[in-house]
Amino acid sequence: MRVETSMIKNTLSYLNPFARLGKRKYSIIFPFIITTLTAIVLEYYFSHILHTPSHVRTPAVLIFLGLIIYFSFRDGMRGGTTATIITISYYFYIIISQYTTQEAFIRDFETTLAFAALYLAMTTIIGGLKQKTDIFIETEANEKNKLQTIIEQMPVGVIITDMTGKVTHANKQLETILDIKIPIGSIFGQDKTKNKASQSPLLYVLNTKKPLKRREFVFEKKDGKKTYIQISASPIYNNSGETFAAAATITDITHQKELEKRKDDFVNIASHELKTPITSMKLFINSLSSRMKKIKDAQTQKIIKHIDYQTNRLQELVNDLLDVSRLQTGKMIFSKEPFLLNDLLKETIENLRAIAKEQNIIFLEKNSLQVSADKFRLQQVVTNLITNAIKYSDPYSDIIVQIQKDSNKAVVSIKDAGIGISREEQKKIFNRLYQVSDKKGKTFPGLGIGLYISKQIVNKHKGSIWVESEKGKGSTFFFSLPLLQRQ
Ligand code: ADP
């Protein structure tokens, strides 16, 4: 039974010209056999069964017209031309075998030639179109294949879903990174293992229509090993702007994360190790300088002052590094208390005026704004922003510190007329270890962590920090803090 069905299916698809679209297989033998057989059957039927050979003409025109159209569509110009040649030969056979008068013969001869021209024109148009369509379909399929091969062999994990979030493609690299099979039709990231990637980033982009940029996830592999992956995903739009799919690239960043962790560990250990000797150095310097005061040797006192200053710098740097590791490990403790922001700014500015002898720090006070915050940490933020303003601006320029109220927030601004920061750099300066370097390389000393620490501290107080600046035209750093209620 099954054999028969498949035979019928095969025969039908062999005969069906639509089933052959896109396949450039053009037979000559099949049209030759069928057209010749048709001619023989017609000839036999009308001459030997009906005994009216002249009646064959009209059915012959119709039947062969049909056959030529069919073969042009099935086998292109080759098939159509083969059928046309047989047909016209048969027409000639008819007019020769049914010769009556020369006049009639000439008339029939001319008609046959006209038919030949018509049939050839038809086969050129239909057969030509069929061949063009085949090439088009084939190229399309090739392009699709090529694209699929590229996706399959890309050096990053690639996943594509339809608009409902169901996977339509997942390449080998992705399965290698995650060490799982991703079945077509499944929803990526929503599997039973309940790993962190289970928020399905692709569903997120499909629902929000927003791209996802370099989002990091932790993925637990089958063997229990943690893999850090970075996903970028985006909805895919058709020409009329409607979403019809979503695509994501997935990179394994485990190695990078390990290096980062090692770097963090190093900073952590180094800063802890440096802390103790510096503290003892400070003690010794203090004791030395009180001894030296008695001796009154101006030169030695000057040297000790220098040592003291540099040790303080060193201590500040180490403290900053320690703060970074505290922030990284979530060990920075904040003890909040209510106070007037104005007082804190005033006190900090007073201290800083001592070091910024050349710049003029102007403070535009506002007395009543009360916040609840960690005083020491906020002082650190203000100090950092003002020392940056001093560091990155010309001597004798003004630094304006202002405090304002904006609905339920206090906004502090520190404005300098210094070197400014380009728009591109503004996005990065609050990142850890980021320093702006000019074309010649680094120009200012520092570790590039002050703004990072400040941002973390302000964020921990539910505030925000930002900058407005133009290269060469100075910068204004702002930070805002929620006001204590009842103001
Ligand atoms: P550091 O000052 O130690 O380099 P920060 O984190 O405090 O580190 O600052 C990061 C970078 O931002 C600096 O390297 C500097 O290029 C830029 N920057 C910070 N404040 C200013 C400012 N007031 N004017 C111009 N550039 C600044």
Image: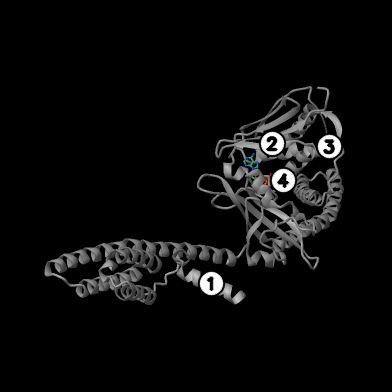
**Front position among marks 2 and 4:** 4
Q: Which of 62 and 151 is in front in this view?
A: 62
Say which label, 3 or 2, has the lower sequence index: 2
Q: What residue is disc 3 on?
A: 374
Contact check, label 2 and label 4, Cβ < 8 Å: no
Mark 2: few, some, or many residues within 10 Å (few <14, many ≥20)? Answer: some
Is residue 285 rendered to the left or right of residue 468?
right
Q: Which mark is residue 452?
A: 4
Residue 188 in picture, x, y percent from top left = 70, 57
Foreground tag (3 vs 1): 1
Label 4 packing within 10 angstroms: few (<14), some (14-19), many (20+): some
Separation of disc 4 and disc 1 at Cα? Answer: 75 Å
What is the distance, in whole Å, between disc 1 and disc 2 at their CAs? Answer: 96 Å
Q: Distance between the residues labelled 3 and 1?
A: 85 Å
Q: Quadrant of the C terminus?
A: top right
Residue tagged by mark 2? 356
Q: Nearer the viewer, mark 1 or mark 2?
A: 1
Q: Looking at the picture, does residue 411 appear above or below residue 313?
A: above
Q: Where is residue 193 in the image (x, y as percent from the top left)?
A: 80, 59
Q: Is mark 4 within 8 Å of ligand 1?
A: yes
Q: What element carries label 4?
A: helix
Q: Between disc 1 and disc 2, whose residue precedes?
A: 1
Q: What residue type is labelled 3?
A: Asp
CB under 8 Å between discs 3 and 1: no
The mark that comes first in sequence, 4 or 1, is 1
Quarter, ligand 1: top right
How much space separates mark 2 and mark 4, taking CA atoms?
23 Å
